[in-house]
Image: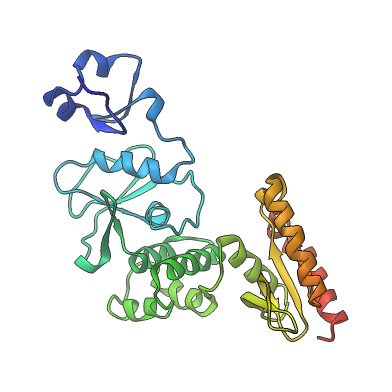
């Protein structure tokens, strides 16, 4: 009997001689869904959205389901939401019993709306954006999803409007145009989009995402998340790893010093600033004012 890696359908594994019924029922194997199991040490963690998606697809027999929503974004390399959200599965016209940790959608996808990521079918970046923008309740998170998926998928946000014209009356379609109007896929990460929107909502003048800074001799100095180029002011998101990873911290300090030498004023933004953007916006406005804007 061979060792089993990853989730498996118990009935198929037993029939193939890969595992015994006794072992399936034993303490070393975890039941994930009906007929879907994994060895106890191989179960995806609650915050491993991609891993949970790979487990979830085995729940649907017959024609493979298509992973959608935030799980699809994660598998596409555009993770943009909480890692603990349920896995969305598009199951066609089949009626299946809902299960904890799953959201099942009865929908029929066009051929160009499905792509393969390794051995898993997922909704395309454009279709995933269409679904998330219509479904998400938070207007900021709609733009976050659109920015991330447009960047990875290489499509213009306006393509969602074209898609919407072919599907008038789709649930949530009125949310699409406002999200497209605020989207900017140049953002390098979801926190950068949240920072940009938080500042503009507080009345800060628009900035340019991912500005490349050069010195007077034309040498590349560094890149900043948001820049007001005419006054050489920047806002730069600093996630926890910028603080806890010593090597990252050293690189950041060297970059900030080089930017300062080039005449730039860089304001770091933390997760706390994203939660309470007003205070950060006040600091940015003050910096812009001192630089003549």
The image quadrant of residue 29 is top left
The residue positioned 84% from the left and 82% from the top of the image is 291
Q: In the image, is 267 to the left or to the right of 186?
A: right
Q: In the image, is 110 to the left or to the right of 248?
A: left
The residue positioned 77% from the left and 69% from the top of the image is 258
Residue 76, given in percent of the width and then of the height, sits at 38, 58
- Viewer-closest of 22 and 168: 22
- Viewer-closest of 256 and 230: 256
Q: In the image, is 106 to the left or to the right of 247?
A: left
Please identify the residue farthest to the right as the structure is shown.
Answer: 290
For residue 161, above or below residue 281:
below
The residue positioned 23% from the left and 68% from the top of the image is 112
Residue 227, given in percent of the width and then of the height, sits at 69, 76
Q: For the C terminus, give its image quadrant.
A: bottom right
Residue 54, given in percent of the width and then of the height, sits at 32, 42
For residue 260, above or below residue 2:
below
Residue 157, given in percent of the width and then of the height, sits at 44, 77
The image quadrant of residue 175 is bottom left
Please identify the residue farthest to the left as the structure is shown.
Answer: 15
The residue positioned 18% from the left and 27% from the top of the image is 13
For residue 112, above or below residue 72:
below
For residue 212, above or below residue 83:
below
């Amino acid at each position: 009997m061979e060792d089993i890696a990853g989730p498996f359908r118990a009935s198929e594994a037993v029939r193939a001689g890969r595992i015994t019924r006794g072992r399936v029922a034993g303490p070393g194997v975890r039941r994930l869904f009906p007929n879907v199991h994994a060895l106890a040490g191989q179960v995806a963690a609650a915050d491993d959205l991609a891993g949970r998606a790979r487990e979830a697809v085995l729940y649907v027999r017959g024609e493979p389901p298509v992973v959608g929503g935030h799980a699809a974004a994660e598998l596409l390399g555009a993770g943009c939401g909480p890692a603990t959200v349920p896995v969305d599965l598009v199951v066609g016209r089949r009626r299946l019993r809902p299960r904890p940790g799953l959201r099942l959608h009865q929908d029929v996808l066009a051929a160009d709306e499905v792509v393969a990521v390794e051995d898993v079918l997922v909704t395309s970046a454009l279709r995933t954006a269409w679904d998330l923008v219509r479904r998400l309740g938070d207007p900021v998170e709609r733009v976050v999803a659109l920015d991330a998926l447009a960047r990875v998928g290489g499509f213009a946000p306006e393509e969602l409007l074209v898609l919407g014209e072919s599907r008038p009356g789709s649930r949530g379609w009125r949310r699409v145009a406002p999200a497209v109007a605020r989207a900017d896929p140049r953002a390098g990460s979801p926190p950068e989009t949240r920072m940009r929107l938080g500042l503009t909502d507080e009345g800060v003048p628009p900035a340019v995402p991912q500005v490349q800074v050069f010195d007077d001799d034309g040498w590349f100095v560094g890149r900043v998340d948001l820049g007001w180029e005419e006054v050489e002011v920047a806002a730069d998101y600093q996630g926890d790893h910028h603080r806890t990873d010593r090597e990252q911290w050293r690189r950041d300090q060297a970059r900030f010093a080089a930017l300062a030498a080039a005449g730039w004023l860089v304001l770091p933004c933390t997760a706390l600033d994203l939660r309470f953007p007003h205070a950060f916006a006040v600091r940015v406005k003050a910096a812009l004012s001192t630089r003549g804007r």
